[in-house]
Image (cartoon, helix red, strand yellow):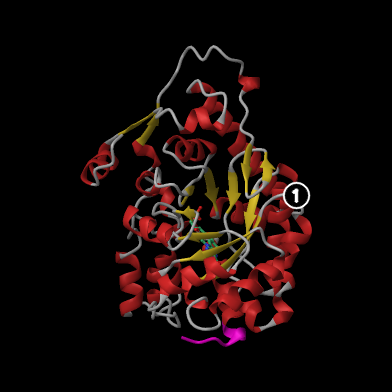
């Protein structure tokens, strides 16, 4: 593992360049949302205008249960991207996360690339972000506090990314001490801790353990969208073991709809993300039991190409479709959509849910 701040910052910008490419996004042909059908109600008996998606998260009233997932910061070129995302989150009243703050823990001059989010998005939840490897060890709780303070965050997301770290040429591959580290950070911080994956999902067994460690919120970030195996693989030479493995493990993990069902009903607040590419996908997350839906790459691409107007447009498309799906299932509120099992599973998703004894 290397902790050279310049290298971390350089890696961030390489990630940004590769993440723009559609061929690292599995949702084009391997999203699992097509195996979820919402149950049509042809007699909604309510007005479309009366559907209310408003939702409370981390103490804020949101227009809809939506999160712009943590992505970037840590290089001067990422500042305008974070600013555009934050302007849109603030204008449309949805939650927002920042990318891993590791770079700024080592080089304080980079802090502004993250704090711009809090400065811009003052009335919505803002979520700090660190990888599990940055909270392991004696400095862990201090790193966590510094990340939260840096952006005056409402929560800290700790990302679990074992596949990414091993495929990453300079990755941190020793995850020993993860559990104690999470427990200690939960104890030391005075804001909630969210544990998230980055595209391989969280199963029920892990969610149980996290709950015992005091974690209250999980973001499944399941398989079906951005593949960090593919992104990191692009950074190794053609024909190298890492590059070859990155393609074979591209869709490793738990598909997002299954992951949501796995971790729902355990007393945790659940964020459904990973391959969520539309408001209909987001509505499916909620119907499967998630409290919030999140997406990263769709907002990232719009921010890079068009700035905050593009992100606002994308958010409005999401929210319109979420409202339409709620209406067409006869749901007036988010909870009516969440709690009434208005979905059918098909194909391999149904098989996996059965195998995992998920009672649907
Ligand atoms: C450009 C980019 C950068 C990301 N950086 C981070 C990060 O620093 N920390 C993190 O927890 N997740 C990061 N992610 C992962 C996302 O938060 C999300 O879990 C994952 O991309 C799956 O969502 P998606 O399929 O909607 O993109 C990043 C994603 C993208 C697209």
- Say whether residue 234 is visible: no
Q: In this view, does 300 lie above or below 285?
A: below
Indicate yes or no whether the magenta region holds residue 5.
yes
Residue 212, horizontal then vertical, whole percent = 41, 60
Disc 1: CA contacts within 10 A as few (<14), some (14-19) or many (>=20): some
Which residue bears the numbered disc 1?
A: 123
**Of residues 134 and 30, the one drawn nearer to the viewer in this rendering:** 134
Residue drawn at x 39%, y 47% is 266
| SS category of the residue bearing label 1 | loop
Residue 247, horizontal then vertical, whole percent = 33, 66
Left or right: 210, with 98 as reference point:
left
Left or right: 141, with 195 as reference point:
right
| Residue 26 in which image quadrant | bottom left
Residue drawn at x 51%, y 15% is 44
Span colored in magenta: 1-7
Indicate yes or no whether the magenta region holds residue 305.
no
Residue drawn at x 53%, y 66% is 186
Q: In this view, does 131 lie above or below 277?
A: below
Residue 272, horizontal then vertical, whole percent = 47, 47
| Residue 180 in which image quadrant | bottom left
Q: In which quarter of the image is the C terminus?
A: top left
Residue drawn at x 59%, y 72% is 144
- Say whether residue 214 is visible: yes
């Amino acid at each position: 593992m290397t902790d050279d701040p310049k290298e971390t910052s350089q890696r961030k910008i390489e990630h940004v360049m590769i993440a723009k490419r559609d061929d690292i996004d599995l949702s084009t042909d391997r999203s699992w949302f097509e195996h979820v059908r919402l149950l049509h109600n042809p007699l909604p008996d309510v007005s479309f205008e009366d559907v209310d998606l408003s939702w409370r998260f981390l103490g804020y009233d949101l227009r809809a249960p939506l999160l712009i997932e943590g992505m970037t910061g840590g290089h001067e070129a990422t500042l305008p991207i974070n600013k555009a995302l934050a302007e849109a989150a603030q204008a449309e009243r949805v939650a927002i996360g920042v990318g891993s703050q590791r770079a700024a823990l080592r080089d304080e001059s980079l802090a502004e690339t993250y704090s711009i989010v809090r400065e811009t998005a003052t009335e919505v939840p803002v979520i700090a972000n660190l990888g599990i490897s940055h909270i392991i060890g004696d400095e862990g709780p201090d790193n966590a506090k510094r990340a939260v303070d840096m952006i005056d965050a409402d929560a800290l997301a700790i990302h679990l990314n074992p596949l990414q770290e091993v495929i990453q040429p300079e990755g941190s591959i020793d995850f020993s001490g993860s559990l104690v580290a999470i427990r200690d950070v939960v104890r030391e911080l005075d804001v909630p801790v969210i544990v998230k994956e980055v595209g391989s999902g969280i199963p029920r067994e892990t969610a149980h353990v996290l709950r015992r460690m005091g974690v209250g919120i999980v973001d499944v970030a399941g398989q079906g969208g951005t593949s960090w195996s593919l992104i990191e693989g692009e950074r190794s030479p053609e024909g190298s073991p890492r590059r070859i493995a990155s393609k074979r493990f591209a869709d490793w993990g738990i598909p997002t709809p299954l992951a949501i069902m796995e971790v729902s009903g355990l007393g945790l607040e659940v964020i459904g993300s990973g391959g969520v590419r539309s408001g209909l996908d987001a509505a499916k997350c909620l119907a499967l039991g998630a409290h919030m839906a999140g997406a990263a790459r769709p907002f990232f691409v719009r921010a890079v190409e068009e700035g905050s107007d593009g992100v606002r447009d994308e958010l409005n498309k999401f929210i319109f479709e979420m409202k339409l799906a709620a209406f067409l299932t006869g749901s007036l509120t988010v909870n009516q959509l969440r709690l009434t099992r208005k979905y059918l599973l098909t194909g391999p998703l149904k098989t996996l849910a059965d195998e995992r004894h998920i009672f649907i």
